[in-house]
Amino acid sequence: MSNVRHRSSDIKQINSFKNYTGIIWVMDSFPVIFIIFKVAVLGTGMFFAVKWHYDQDRKARKGDVLTAVGKISAILALLLVGLLFATFKLASLLGLDMQLSQ
C-alpha cells in the first residue's frame, strides 16, 4: 500500500514539473513573440505613415505646408506650456518644493 502512495506522489511531482517547464517556456518565448509583434505593428505603422506623407506631399502646395507647420508648432508650444504647468501643480500637490532659490 505504501508503494502505491509513493508512486502517486512521484506522478504528482512529474506533473508539477511539466507545468513548471510549461511556464518557463512561456516566459522564455514571450520576448520573441513580443518583438515579432512589435516589429509587425511598427512596420505597418511606418508604412502607412510614409504613404500618407507621400500622398499629402503630392497634394499640398508650399503655402499650405507652411501654414500647417505653423499651426502644429503653436499647438505643440501650448501643449508644452500646459504640461509644464500641470507638472508644477502636481509637484506642489505632492508637497515638493519647486521654488527657484537664488
Image (cartoon, rainbow, N blue to C red):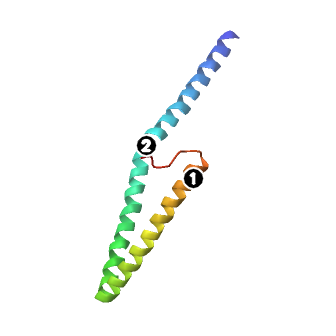
| Residue 12 relative to residue 40: left or right | right
Q: Residues within 10 Å of mark 1 (few under 14, many from 20)?
A: few
Most extreme residue toward the top, as rendered? 2
Q: Residues within 10 Å of mark 2 (few under 14, many from 20)?
A: few
**Amino acid marked by disc 1:** Leu
| Residue 56 relative to residue 90: left or right | left
Label placed on residue 29: 2
Identity of the residue drawn at 52% across and 36% down: 23
The quadrant where residue 95 appears: top right
Between 100 and 3, the one nearer to me in the picture: 100
Mark 2 element type: helix
Name above or below for residue 83 compared with residue 3.
below
Q: x, y (%) of residue 64?
A: 35, 87
Name above or below for residue 42 compared with residue 60.
above
Can you tell which of label 2 and label 1 is closer to the viewer? 1
Mark 1 element type: helix
Between 74 and 29, the one nearer to me in the picture: 74
Identity of the residue drawn at 47% across and 65% down: 81
| Residue 63 relative to residue 15: left or right | left
Q: CA distance from mark 2 to mark 1?
A: 40 Å
**Amino acid marked by disc 2:** Ser
Q: x, y (%) of residue 62?
A: 28, 87
Q: Earlier in the sequence, mark 2 or mark 1?
A: 2
Name above or below for residue 23 compared with residue 83.
above
Identity of the residue drawn at 54% across and 27% down: 17
Identity of the residue drawn at 43% across and 70% down: 76
Label placed on residue 42: none
Q: x, y (%) of residue 36?
A: 39, 53
The residue pinned by badge 1 equals 90
